[in-house]
Amino acid sequence: MANFVERRAFNIIGIFDGLEDYLNTGDPVVREWFLVKSNFWPIFLCGLYLLTIKVIGPSFMRDRKPFELRKTMIIYNLFLVATYFACVSLVIYGMTKTDPMAMCKDTVVTKKDYTYLMATCGWVIYLLKYLEFLDTIFFILRKKDKLITNLHVIHHASLPLCGWIFFRTERSGFQAYPIIINSVIHIVMYSYYGLAAMGPSVRKYLWWKRYLTIAQMVQFILIILFVTVVMPLTGCSAAKTSIYINVVAAALFFILFYNFYRHSFQPKKLSDSEKCNETKKKIENGKIHTNGHANGDVAVNGQSKVKCN
């Protein structure tokens, strides 16, 4: 029995040793950076985020009035838009100075090369994923808990861990392309949030939320096509974890965003009783005229009849 337990413990230790070795296969320079080198802090911060939004935050706000955070949120969203824009611009600039095929192969980041500039921008974007925990915390402080969907929580809790694994295991620069696609969407998204925070006078012009959600779904399709079609055709190399994470995460978020889109923007089908009640309210308010009677079969402005009792 003792030998069995010892062998099991040895096997478990061996698994963790193998995982540790694999997490050290990325670029030797990048994997030493802040919140990349540590095996503890990325997991701890994501766990703390979940604990905060599920337990600490709601408990703290239970007997308190909502906070007024309009100015704070405007500054916060403006900062994110500016930072994403700067990083995307610098990455694109670095790409114009670098051989595209060289980016698709295993490279070593050096300070004298544009790869260092692009890697630094990618790292800054990775750090922003932790700052974006504030999205959810602001909801809690404003008592907008209904806006904290499963999509929202999964998105914010998982992306920092994905970025951490990318930086620990990836040596190819191919990830620059998905980063650009995703960052452009975030520029538009946080622009929307910043404008919405300015109040009703501006919010009434934000009719394009639906199209922002469509753009988010399109980005996931583009990322999947890039990883599964473009990369193999061009001969790009990448860590297997990068390929798996890109495909699985993009597919998962596409499903979640589509579900959000379907429930938020597609009109709900009303039952006959719901149609009848809606019709009666409009008749009582004088908004429509009937070609029938208030009770029985009601034909609204010449449209099909609804059986009302």
Image: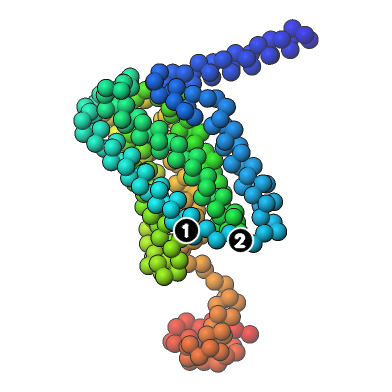
* Residue that appears at 64% across and 49% down: 57
In this view, 216 is above or below 249: below
Which of the two residues, 161 or 255, is positioned nearer the viewer here? 161
Q: State the scheme by which the image is colored.
A: rainbow
Residue 81: x and y in percent read: 37, 49
Q: Name the residue under label 2.
A: 66
Element under label 1? helix
In this view, 91 is above or below 80: above
Element under label 2? loop
Which quarter of the rendered picture does the C terminus lie within? bottom right
Number of numbered discs overlaid on the protein picture: 2
- Between tags 1 and 2, which lies in front? 1
Which of the two residues, 63 or 176, is positioned nearer the viewer here? 63
Tell me the amino acid under the disc marked 1.
Answer: Lys
Most extreme residue toward the right is 1
Tell me the amino acid under the disc marked 2.
Answer: Pro
* Residue that appears at 28% across and 41% down: 89
Residue 245: x and y in percent read: 45, 33
Residue 157 appears in the rendering? yes
Residue 262: x and y in percent read: 48, 58
* Residue that appears at 67% across and 46% down: 56
Point out which mark residue 4 bears.
none
Q: Earlier in the sequence, mark 1 or mark 2?
A: 2
Most extreme residue toward the top is 3
In this view, 172 is above or below 178: above
Q: Name the residue under label 1.
A: 71
Residue 119: quarter of image: top left
* Residue that appears at 26% across and 24% down: 113
In this view, 250 is above or below 238: below
Q: How crowded is mark 1: few (under 14 residues within 10 Å), some or many (20 or more)?
A: few
